[in-house]
Image (tube, rainbow, N blue to C red):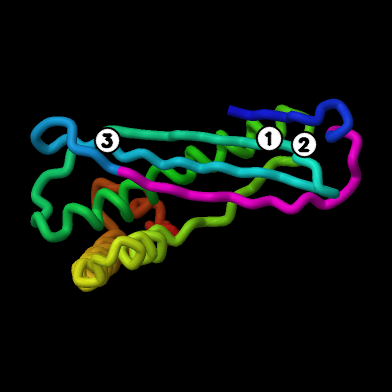
């Protein structure tokens, strides 16, 4: 949702607003290996003590999680799944704000691993931080192996036949 509670006065202001954005991630099981992951983004822009706009987005998706050890399930759901959702949510927020005659709100990338650690600390589950760190290290190792594998040309790969090297862009 998008609100401009002080329109039309807020539209004519030429001041840099103070923008605060909060991010929350939640996951819930649906059935078997299916989980719903919800990414909630809330933003508020204020200038001179007045609210210019409020924006709120709840963006969710259903993920089928298979072949993940139980101790890694929570980090996958609360780190990797929202990382996949974020670019789409960021675009929706930027478009909603821009379509309302304000400059687009371009959200910086979010460190979902850091957010996960912060959530664990808030609820006193420090033991799970080790599992999250192991998961992240394993994920980075697998990602590195995938990148090495994609740099070798494959005969069926059109780019390789034309002398181009495949590369993978990291976030």
- Tag 3, which secondary structure? strand
x then y, percent, for residue 119: 35, 60
Residue shown at 77% from the left, 36% from the top: 102
Crowding near pointer 3: few (<14 within 10 Å), some, many (20+)? some
For residue 71, what is the image quadrant? bottom left
Residue where numbered disc 2 is placed:
102
- Which label is found at residue 36? 3
Q: CA distance from mark 1 to mark 3?
A: 27 Å
Q: CA distance from mark 1 to mark 2?
A: 6 Å
- Tag 2, which secondary structure? loop
Question: Which region of the structure is painted magenta?
Answer: 11-26
Q: CA distance from mark 2 to mark 3?
A: 32 Å
Looking at the picture, does residue 57 appear above or below residue 171?
A: above
Mark found first going from the N terminus, 1 or 2: 1
Residue shown at 71% from the left, 36% from the top: 53
Residue 109, visible in the rendered structure: yes
Q: Are marks 2 and 3 in contact (CB under 8 Å)?
A: no
x then y, percent, for residue 154: 25, 54
Name the residue nearer the viewer: 126 or 161. 126
Looking at the picture, does residue 82 appear above or below residue 38?
A: below
Mark found first going from the N terminus, 2 or 3: 3
Crowding near pointer 2: few (<14 within 10 Å), some, many (20+)? some
Residue 152, visible in the rendered structure: no
Residue shown at 90% from the left, 45% from the top: 14
- Which label is found at residue 97? 1
Instruction: Say whether residue 70 is left or right of residue 83.
Output: left
Mark found first going from the N terminus, 1 or 3: 3
- Tag 1, which secondary structure? helix
x then y, percent, for residue 69: 9, 56
């Amino acid at each position: 949702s998008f609100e401009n509670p002080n329109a039309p006065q807020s539209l004519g202001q030429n001041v840099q607003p103070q923008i605060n954005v909060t991010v929350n991630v939640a996951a819930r099981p649906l059935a078997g290996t299916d989980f719903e992951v919800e990414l909630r983004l809330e933003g508020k822009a204020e200038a001179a003590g007045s609210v210019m706009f409020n924006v709120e987005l709840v963006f969710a998706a259903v993920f089928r999680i298979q072949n993940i050890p139980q101790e890694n399930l929570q980090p996958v759901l609360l780190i990797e799944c929202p990382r996949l959702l974020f670019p789409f949510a960021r675009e929706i927020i930027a478009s909603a704000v821009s379509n309302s005659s304000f400059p687009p709100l371009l959200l910086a990338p979010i460190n979902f691993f850091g957010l996960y650690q912060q959530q664990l600390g808030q609820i006193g589950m420090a033991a799970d931080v080790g599992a999250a760190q192991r998961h992240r290290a394993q994920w980075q190792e697998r990602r590195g192996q995938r990148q090495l594998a994609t740099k070798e040309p494959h005969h069926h790969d059109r780019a390789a036949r034309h002398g181009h090297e495949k590369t993978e862009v990291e976030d």
